[in-house]
Image: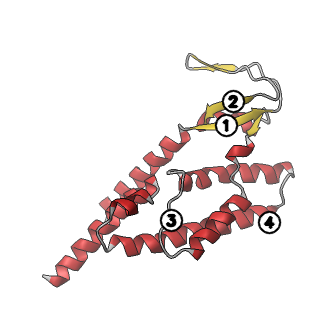
Amino acid sequence: MLKIKEDLEELLTRTNFVFKHSEILTECVKDYKGFSLLNMKIGPFKRGKNYKLKFFIAVPLIKKNILILSPQEKCDNIVVQRYAISERDDRRLREIDEKNFLNKIKEFKLFMEKMIEDGTKPKSDLDKFNSYKANIIDSRLLKLLRLARTELSVADERRLTNSERILISKISELIHKWRGFYIQ
């Protein structure tokens, strides 16, 4: 059992690594000359301009109030609430447009925390964000457990996020072994 846990954690960490290397859209709020990192020039940034940057590069610049998330990248308690309600109201596993959506809400929590530190959002918004995030995870997990007992169709697979594909393969394998042990 320990091996499955380690494999699952490693695979989920990898999917999160891939997400952190994906690009997000930002907007510059303060001119900045830029910097070099390992022979890679980052910047300069001009106020009012939009920049597409890898997530892991954008985070420190956002924390330093040089950039902000573009409105198209918004993932706050209101966005997460909308997903939580739609997951709750639909018994079937619904397709999420972003295959790394669960990683996104995991990582974008730090932006909610920053807005609370800056005083632009109340702490109750972070509490709501966390609650809605847990609702999404729990709702999807229950649906995945039901799916894991069956053979996945192509349509079912299309509705899975990247991290859910990893989980369902592990769960399905365990369920089939457990069931087979007792049916034989």
Residue 184's quadrant in the figure? bottom left
Q: Residue furthest right?
A: 119
* Distance of label 3 from label 4 (alpha carbons): 28 Å
Q: Residue at x 75, y 34 (%)?
A: 27
Does dot 4 land on a helix, a strand or a loop? helix
Indicate which disc residue 51 carries: 2
Indicate which disc residue 94 carries: 3
Indicate which disc residue 171 carries: none
Residue that label 1 marks: 25
Does dot 1 land on a helix, a strand or a loop? strand
Residue 96, image x and y in percent? 53, 57
- Amino acid type of the residue that numbered disc 3 sits on in the rendered structure: Arg
Does dot 3 land on a helix, a strand or a loop? loop
Label 2, residues with CA under 10 Å away: few <14, some 14-19, many ≥20 = some
Q: Is residue 18 left or right of residue 130?
A: left
Do callouts 2 and 4 mark residues in contact (Cβ within 8 Å)?
Answer: no
Label 4, residues with CA under 10 Å away: few <14, some 14-19, many ≥20 = few
